Amino acid sequence: MTNASAIKEEFVPWSSRIMVSAADGAVAMLQGMIGGGALTYYFTRWRGLDPGYAGIVWLLFGLWNAFNDPLFGYISDRTKHKLGRRIPYIRYGAPLFALAFVACWLNLPGTQTDQIAMFAQMLVLLFAFDTLYTVIATSLYIMPYEMAVSNKARGSIIIWKVLFNALAIAAPLIIIPIIQPGPNQDADPFRWIMTAFGVGVGVIIFSSTFFYREKNFQQAEGQFPLIQSFRECFKNFSFIVFEVLSFTVIYAQTGLMQGVLYYFDELKIAPLPLFAALGVGVIVGLVAWVRLRQNVKGAMRAMTLLFAIGCLALAFGGGVFIVAIACFFLLGLGFSGGMFLVPLMNGDVIDADEHRTGLRREGMYAGVNSFITKPAISIAQAVFLWITTAFGYNQSLDKGLQSASAQMGILIGWGLVPGLLLFLCFVLLRWYPLAGAEWDTIKSALAARHEEKERAMVG
């Protein structure tokens, strides 16, 4: 076995770590605003698009997502450019990404009373935004593996990514309910603020690419053809379990971020104490999950159970202040677990694939993961709209005027489905195989193999 002390340790500059993580968080923030319900709310509540049409938009969008993510993951793995395989997409995609986000909030003349025109506009803008999001977010997701070889150096980047992504999740949850326009309210301030967000994020992403470089040693390694590469992912049982969990976490996060926009409109509960409880939950969760990181399976089971309890309690008791406080704390535990434990588990799944195939296929795994999880965003949006409509939610009413039945529909649509899915994950994780002495032995063997690659790469 290679002597680890003989390996020259890599150092990733602070500026590189911070800027790639800031770009990753900035991209996630805009996606959180679009995917978390702000676009749906804007089109249905302010512009008057029928919720049924909005639901169809998200379902059609989900079909597109079944193809673009794995395809781009495959293409990016094989890109050859003087800047590297990922940086060209990040740098030159940033201005287009910002433009697509700004365009989402334009109120085109003559469309305000035309349902088909609004439907078409929402569909086209969502497709354009998400295609650019896929190109940039997938590239940023892979960058730690391109910037460094050693696990220690990669870990120093991922820590910063967790911090910036926590801010990316918090920003839409706190800012959007404050600035979003309701029916018959002036939307100009909202549009200007969203435009500023889009431009600012574009500048951060573009500028970040001048602070880090890629190491392209993996370009020399062979890869499977596209179809085989896709199929091989599903021969990895741990990946299947992981994807059920990943889908559920994305569904829960999307549904909760969308529901909060409606919750504070209609249930007269002070938001500040609830957001404080959420923040405390995130902090407590991060401390707990970091301490439990050596037992990913056990930590995941604890996280999914607590997250499920929070969602189910929210569905049936979220109108009571004390219950809501406890729910938001548990949601914070769940959100922090999604930020920290899911990437950790994903790394183990990719390691298991390398143990089986002998190849490192991060790009393809990132694409296939998005292939499965992005439809969760569409389904969560559509299901919430269908449930609230079934309970009598009236999109044309001003804030605070919904019926008691509609208020109940908000709570049920917000927490019931995510809670049930998370509990199923808690049960399914019992059979997750990457744990115990045998897995520890495999990880040690992989570490030895990586040390040899590190020696060859860093000298």
Image (tube, rainbow, N blue to C red):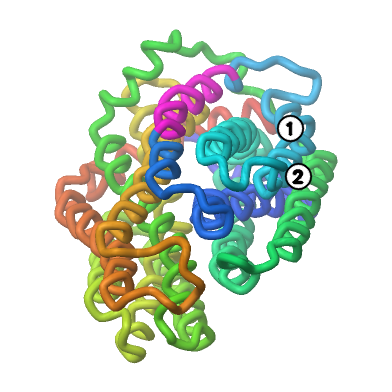
Instruction: State yes or no: residue 61 in magenta.
Output: yes
Quarter-wise, where is residue 414 in the image? bottom left
158 or 357, nearer to the observer: 158
Q: Residue at x 51, y 59 (%)?
A: 45
Quarter of the N terminus within the rendering: top left
Q: Residue at x 31, y 79 (%)?
A: 318
Question: Local crowd at mark 1 within 10 Å, few (<14), some, or many (≥20)?
Answer: some
**Magenta span: chief secondary structure:** helix
Picture quadrant of residue 395: bottom left
The disc label shown at residue 205, or none = 2
Residue range of the region highlighted in magenta in the rendering = 60-75
Apparent side of residue 427 relative to residue 258 in the rendered image (left or right): left
Q: Quadrant of residue 347?
A: top left
Number of other residues with Cα within 10 Å of mark 2, as a class: few under 14, some 14 to 19, many 20 or more: many
Query: Which residue is depicted at the point 26% across and 64% down?
Result: 391
**Residue shown at 51%/40% (left/top)?**
115
Q: Which numbered disc, 2 or 1, marks the residue that appears first in the sequence?
A: 1
Report the residue marked by disc 1: 93
